[in-house]
Image (cartoon, rainbow, N blue to C red):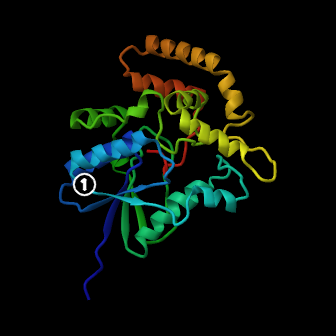
């Protein structure tokens, strides 16, 4: 009996690292039959979908859109209206990991993860014995500058949301920094309002917030100060590292504000 074929998969998040990894794998391992997937929560920015379409066109690939059998609102109700948070990431489990593991099934799978050599963090590592993770950027010593070069030289470029946001993920992701929430209100006021409604609408009258210590409306009342502080930090960073791109400056400033690392099942 012939041995069952091993599947090779690569998750795309709509962010720079996973996109650069797809480019890198296509160039370095052209004969490898890779299946590309995106875990779709249906709570993404429209820019994310546009960027995924650009990736498909440029690389000539098909992205499999995976989704949970039940949507975010169902699981929010199951968890008693408790919004997901760094301490309770039920959204990652229910809307990312479970759909992925269902898609994989019992097949022998190698999943390629875009963690760079200059990062000290872990991605999604499955406990399923049939799924093996590999980290090509770490193996090849690729750092952030290499990733940005991949995107520039390929012509794919960066997602449009990198003008004001440094990570991929849902529009209401609890890992967003204060400035990113303010910019969500500016760039997508309808989505910001939906995020506000998730904070407010609970049958039992309890209050949950996306950011610790204040509601989104309270945060927005401080928007002028948040923007002013951000612009001051951006100017300082640009003076200290004048050769950085605007997206690099933004990422470093936001990381200084909040250096917490989100789960790579969502952000790459």
Q: Nearer the viewer, residue 39 or 76?
A: 76
Write the residue at 28% across / 36% down. 151
Up-down relation of residue 95 to residue 154 (above or below):
below
**Identity of the residue drawn at 75% across and 50% down:** 202
The x, y position of residue 213, in whole percent, is: 75, 34
- Count up the numbered dots: 1
Is residue 205 something that shows in the picture? Answer: yes
Dot 1 alpha-carbon crowd within 10 angstroms: few under 14, some 14 to 19, many 20 or more: some
Q: Is residue 72 left or right of residue 268?
A: right
- In this rendered view, identify the residue nearer to me: 63 or 17: 63
Left or right: 250, with 9 as reference point: right
Q: Secondary structure at mark 1?
A: loop
Q: Residue at x 78, y 44 (%)?
A: 207
Q: Quadrant of residue 226?
A: top right
Which residue occupies the extreme bottom position in the image?
A: 1
Residue 116 seen in the figure: no
Image quadrant of residue 74?
A: bottom right
Query: With respect to residue 248, does 109 lie above or below?
Result: below
Q: Residue furthest right?
A: 205
Quadrant of the rendering where the N terminus is positioned: bottom left
The residue to which callout 1 is attached is 61
Name which residue lies at 49% across and 44% down. 169
Image quarter in which the C terminus is found: top left
């Amino acid at each position: 009996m012939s041995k069952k074929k091993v599947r090779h998969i690569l998750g795309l998040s709509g962010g720079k690292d996973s996109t650069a990894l797809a480019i890198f794998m296509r160039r370095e391992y052209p004969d490898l039959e890779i299946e590309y997937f995106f875990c779709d929560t249906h709570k993404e920015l429209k820019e994310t979908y546009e960027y995924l379409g650009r990736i498909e066109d440029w690389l000539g690939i098909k992205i499999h859109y995976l989704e949970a059998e039940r949507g975010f609102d169902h699981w929010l109700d199951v968890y008693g209206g408790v919004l997901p948070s760094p301490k309770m990431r039920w959204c990652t489990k229910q809307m990312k990991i479970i759909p992925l593991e269902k898609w994989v099934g019992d097949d022998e799978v190698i999943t390629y993860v875009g963690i760079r050599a200059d990062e000290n963090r872990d991605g999604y590592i499955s406990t399923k014995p049939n799924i093996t993770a590999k980290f090509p950027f770490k193996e090849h010593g690729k750092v952030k500058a290499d990733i940005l070069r991949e995107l520039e030289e390929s012509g794919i470029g960066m997602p449009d949301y990198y003008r004001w946001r440094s990570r991929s993920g849902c529009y209401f992701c609890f890992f967003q920094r204060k400035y990113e929430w303010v910019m969500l209100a500016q760039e997508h006021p309808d989505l910001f309002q939906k995020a506000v409604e998730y904070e407010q609408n609970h049958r039992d009258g309890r209050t949950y917030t996306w950011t610790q210590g204040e509601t989104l409306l309270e945060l927005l009342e401080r928007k002028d100060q948040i923007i002013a502080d951000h612009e001051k930090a951006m100017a300082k960073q640009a003076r200290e590292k004048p050769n950085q791109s605007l997206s690099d400056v933004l990422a470093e400033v936001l990381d200084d504000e909040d250096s917490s690392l989100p789960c790579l099942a969502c952000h790459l």
